[in-house]
Amino acid sequence: MSSLAIINCSQLVTLAGPQRPRVGEELRELSIIENGAMLLREGRIEKVGKRETIEPLLTADCEVVDAANRIVLPGFVDAHTHPVFAGNRANEFELRASGATYEQIALAGGGIRSTVRNTRAASEDELVVSGKRYAEWFLRCGTTTVEAKSGYGLTVEDELKMLRAIRRLNDETPLSYVPTFLGAHVVPEEFKGNSSGYVDLIVEEMLPRVATENLAEFCDVFCEVGAFTVEESRRILIAAKQLGLKLRVHADQLSLGGGSALAAELGATTADHLEQADQSAIRNLQSAMVQPVLLPCSVLMIGSQKYANARAMIEAGLAVIIATDFNPGSSPVVSMLLALTLASTQMKMTPAEAISAATVNAAYSLGRGNEIGSLEPGKRADVVIHDCGDYRELAYFAGLEHPHAVFVNGKNAFSR
């Protein structure tokens, strides 16, 4: 069928509004159509409105989906994930439950480096197989687009292998992937004591290959004590920018180490984590209109109590984003629904603010704001019917997979 109608929506949560990321009070304006309906054609949204205005437009060959008085939203846009890796770190989860900290595990040879060992040993095909499993998990939780980072290879060929796997997953699954090169995730074992040598490898070999093969849209750096210094991060990001990549920065997660200031200095699209960001860091981000990507699931999963100060960021006029940080170590979480719950209970964002942060704002941070993130005519038909009667129930009824049906490009990608 080339055309599809979704009718009988208790709330059609369109998020229609200004064609830019939402800030301040705009985050609470979801542009809800009560008793709504929508018409999709050739994978695009053709019209949204009240049921009584849409139904007369339906033709005999139009497939009709009855939402049965459920809510309908755009697909979630998860703007920070690490969805390609081999193995898992359930053993470290047990260690943290027994009292070990994330930093202690990393110093003992675990953490990111343990996933690096497994990922280096895996073939591209094996990474695609496991990646497809995680793609299904994202879809069943209502996520239709993810930003996807490399960073578990840390050699030229293994980083390229990861990015090629991401490209294949984009082609071979309904989930949409936006690739990010994160060669600067951690200094690998073979460069221990020689971080400058590893930075040379990133700048002189990895980045040119990534750019030549057009394998990534963004470059990210983990700017943190124990990972990369501000000076090392600056060198990598400037080189990436010169090659045409846009910038993202892991900043101020475990310490207030200057990552957010660097993101502002270089005009990065986002600064991610920001659990330690203070008012000065927030002012830096605001001065350059860097979008903060807040990752409450990783705070929960490493057993920390310190969440990013979302309220201060919203009050400063920043276009806040919520994402999962899905990865095998600090955040083995694919559920944007859990992220919404944590945003409201731990970061005191209203349900509406959290939904804006998980859809339209995230879409703009990925350069996809004109395509996804809201239900407006002309945009891609990435649409989710949730088994709720009110949008606030998504975060309120916690721990449930609410999606009843997920459509990507107007085609059913998951049904419960």
Image (cartoon, rainbow, N blue to C red):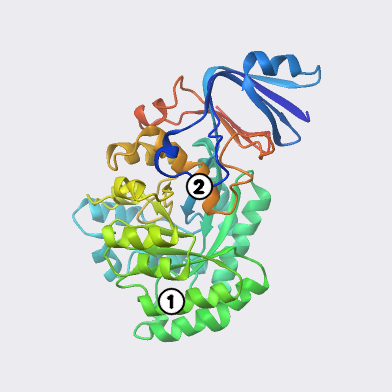
- Circle 1: residue type: Arg
Kindly tell me whether residue 61 is visible in this rendering: yes
- Residue 306 x %, y %: 24, 51
Question: In the rendering, which numbered label is found on residue 234?
Answer: 1
Q: Residue at x 46, y 33 (%)?
A: 29
- In this picture, is 118 found above or below 4? below
Name the residue: 38% across, 65% down: 112
Residue at label 2?
21
- Quadrant location, the N terminus: top right
Residue in front for this viewpoint, 52 or 410: 52
Query: Considering depth in this image, is 395 or 244 the residue closer to the camera?
Result: 244
Which residue of the protein is positioned furthest toward the right in this rendering? 60
Q: How far from the left and from the top, in percent, is residue 153?
A: 50, 69
State the image quarter where residue 415 is shown: top right
How crowded pointer 2 is (Cα within 10 Å; few <14, some 14-19, many 20+) is rated as: many
Left or right of residue 303: residue 139 = right
Q: Secondary structure at mark 1?
A: helix
Res. 166 image quadrant: bottom right
Q: How far is disc 1 from disc 2 in space, using C-alphas?
A: 26 Å
First in sequence: mark 1 vs mark 2: 2
Residue 309, x across and y down, in percent: 29, 50
Left/right placement of residue 275 relative to residue 319 reads: left
Amino acid identity at mark 2: Pro
Labels 1, 2: front one: 2
